[in-house]
Amino acid sequence: MGNGYEDIYFDNCPQVRYRVVLGARSTKKSTDICGYEPLLKIFSNPIRNVLILRLNDSDNGRSTFPLIEKCARRMGVYEQLHFKNQIPREVVYERTGQKIMFGGFNNASDLTSIQVPTGELTDIYIEEASQIDSIEDFQILDGSIRAKLPVGVFLQITFLLNPWDI
């Protein structure tokens, strides 16, 4: 785990809707927060499903999707997951049907109707969040993440940024 990120993991601040995580290159920000944490979330609670966004979905195929694969191998859980690396990309936890989905922010209206077969969409990660320049598009996305959840489970959006981008 990168230095300092142990204080950010979801079990430390579960009740906040928005988190902003800053870190320069080689700080393991993406690996720890956008790689390991989504896997930990789906394995820790059968309600949770995750959406990982970049500005363009095609960028996920070269960055966030292989990152999730690498983290799953390191955690020893790769065989419990089904990896679909065609659009729409997704990782399915075979035991429960929970998903880690991938998408692009370039058409925010497509993000409003995401459904999951089990549980709820509870967590969104926006990698390279500084590339998202439309507050209106973010508001569309933010308004679409809603659900009645059991006590102790919260909706959360995490922005991952490089410090020179703000």
Image (spheres, rainbow, N blue to C red):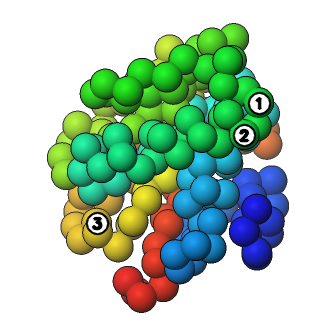
Q: CA distance from mark 1 to mark 2?
A: 5 Å
Q: Position of residue 14 (x, y in %)?
A: 73, 55
Q: Is residue 129 above or below residue 33?
A: below
| SS state under label 3 | loop
> Disc 3 designates what residue?
132
Which residue occupies 79% across, 69% down?
7
Write down the residue under mark 1: 76
Left or right of 138? Residue 122 is: right
Report the disc number at residue 74. 2
| Quadrant placement of the C terminus | bottom left
Instruction: Residue 6: give x, y in percent of width and height.
Output: 80, 65
> Which picture quadrant has residue 77?
top right
Regarding residue 73, the answer to whether it shows in the image is: yes
Label 2, residues with CA under 10 Å away: few <14, some 14-19, many ≥20:
few
Cα gap from disc 3 to disc 2, whole angstroms: 31 Å
Q: Amino acid at mark 1?
A: Gly
